[in-house]
Amino acid sequence: MIDQPQLLSKEEWLEWLMPVEDPELFMPLVDLGLIYNVAQEGSSVSVTMTLTSPGCPAAGYLVEEVKKRILEHKSAESVSVDVVFEPKWDPSTMASDEVKDKLGIW
């Protein structure tokens, strides 16, 4: 019998992605509000995310770090990351309270 992959919820995947940090802000992408969605179908995981700006110099690095982290989970065999710019990232509404405090947004 073939083991079925464990299906994680969006919230569980977001928790799993917490170690992935922005290399300039040193804060988790999840807390920054840059990860819009994570969905799993079988052993395939898809991530929808954005960047702090369309010209973010760390774009490729961030996408690769998200992919690498997802693939470290035993239930993921493949991952796709879709970078979108709609809705536009707004830390005042999308970031965690802790990040808003660190960034001085209040």
Image (cartoon, grey):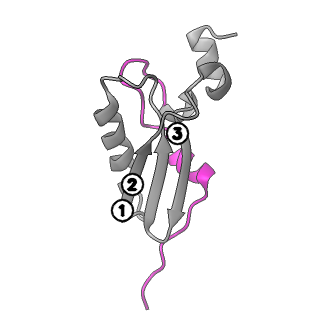
Task: Please check the rendered image and state whether residue 5 is part of the magenta-colored stretch, yes or no.
Answer: yes
Task: State the SS at label 3.
Answer: strand
Q: Amino acid at mark 1?
A: Ser
Magenta region: which residues?
Answer: 1-28
Task: State the SS at label 1.
Answer: strand
Q: Amino acid at mark 2?
A: Ser
Where's residue 4, x and y in %? 48, 79
Q: Which mark is residue 80?
A: 2
Task: Depth check: give the residue in front, 43 or 51.
Answer: 51
Q: Amino acid at mark 3?
A: Ile
Q: Which residue is mark 1?
A: 78
Q: Are marks 2 and 1 in contact (CB under 8 Å)?
A: yes
Task: Please check the rendered image and state whether residue 88 is part of the magenta-colored stretch, yes or no.
Answer: no
Where's residue 48, x and y in %? 49, 46
Q: Which mark is residue 35?
A: 3
Magenta: main secondary structure: loop
